């Protein structure tokens, strides 16, 4: 049984005051982390404050990091620093970074290796644009993205990797993939991991769905056998909605 992960991706939202208010609102009500893994991924300058206030059950993630250990890379954030301040998760290869910041499958792969080197739990994003889905090429697209992202990873590193299937056409659009569509693509990703390693390893990797997840649809999505949780953008900004989604996840598990 894979443990459910519900991760909020706040993107470039929230000031420090808003972030601290959110943590204050949710802290006492986050489900036990042995049952549901709850994560908030915030802008880099908020991370230290959030880690200090994360409580027993919430964990904090970054939204990006650089692939190199240190150096003259103005404006970038290293995995070493994230680990050093107590961050435990990092989103890698979000489609917004691939689209607006020229991230490639190759840089995603390098970042993934670097994150694991520093004991950060990577949440690696894959997912197709609408044109690919319309051509009926979703499976081969996510298969290739998955293979390239995971290239060179050892079998024993795979257990720490979380993958998020986020179809680009469903992000921020209010168009959620149906639970069946999300489950199919997630299965394709799992089968790809099975081919790279073996079915036993693939069976342990958590694969999330992301793209217009909210309090209304999360239950049907995580009820699908291949979907192990959600990466939630807009709906994670409200503490009330975030807690509601965690409660639904907890009900699903128990
Ligand atoms: P929305 O939930 O706002 O569609 O965003 C999804 C996402 O990109 C999470 O990483």
Image: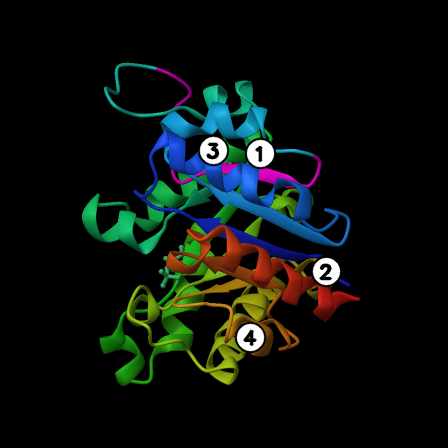
* Any part of residue 80 in sight: yes
Label 2 and label 1: CA atoms lie apart by 19 Å
Closer to viewer: mark 2 or mark 3: 3
- Give the residue number, with chain letter if any, for mark 1: 88
Q: Secondary structure at mark 3?
A: helix
> Which one is in front, 216 or 69?
216
- Give the residue number, with chain letter if any, for mark 2: 2
Closer to viewer: mark 4 or mark 2: 4
The magenta span reads 56-70
- Are there few (<14), some (14-19), or many (20+) residues within 10 Å of tag 1? many
Residue drawn at x 50%, y 75% as measured from the top left: 216
Label 3 and label 4: CA atoms lie apart by 29 Å
Residue drawn at x 66%, y 62% as measured from the top left: 247
Q: Secondary structure at mark 4?
A: helix
Q: Secondary structure at mark 2?
A: loop
Label whose residue precedes the other's in the sequence (2 or 3): 2
- Give the residue number, with chain letter if any, for mark 3: 20
Residue drawn at x 77%, y 48% as measured from the top left: 34
Label whose residue precedes the other's in the sequence (4 or 2): 2
Label 1 and label 4: CA atoms lie apart by 25 Å
């Amino acid at each position: 049984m894979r443990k459910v992960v519900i991760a909020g991706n706040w993107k470039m939202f929230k000031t420090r005051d808003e972030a601290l208010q959110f943590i204050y609102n949710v802290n006492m009500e986050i489900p036990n982390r042995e049952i549901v893994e709850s994560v908030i991924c915030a802008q880099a300058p908020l991370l230290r404050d959030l880690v200090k206030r994360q409580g027993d059950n919430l964990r904090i993630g970054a939204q990006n990091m650089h692939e190199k250990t240190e150096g003259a890379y103005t404006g970038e954030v290293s995995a070493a620093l994230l680990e050093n301040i107590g961050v435990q998760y990092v989103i890698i290869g979000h489609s917004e970074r691939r689209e607006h910041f020229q991230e490639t499958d190759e840089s995603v792969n390098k970042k993934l290796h670097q994150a694991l080197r520093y004991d950060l739990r990577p949440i690696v994003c894959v997912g197709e644009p609408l044109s690919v889905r319309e051509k009926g090429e979703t499976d081969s697209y996510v298969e290739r993205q998955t293979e390239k992202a995971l290239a060179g990873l050892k079998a024993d590193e795979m257990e720490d990797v979380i993958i998020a299937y986020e179809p680009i056409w469903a992000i921020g659009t209010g168009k959620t993939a149906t639970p069946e569509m999300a489950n199919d693509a997630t299965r394709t990703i799992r089968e790809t991991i099975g081919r790279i390693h073996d079915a036993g390893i693939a069976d342990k990797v958590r694969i999330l769905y992301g793209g217009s997840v909210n309090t209304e649809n999360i239950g049907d999505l995580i009820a699908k056998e291949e979907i192990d949780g959600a990466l939630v953008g807009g709906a994670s900004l409200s503490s009330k909605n975030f807690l509601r989604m965690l409660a639904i996840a907890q009900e699903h598990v128990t």
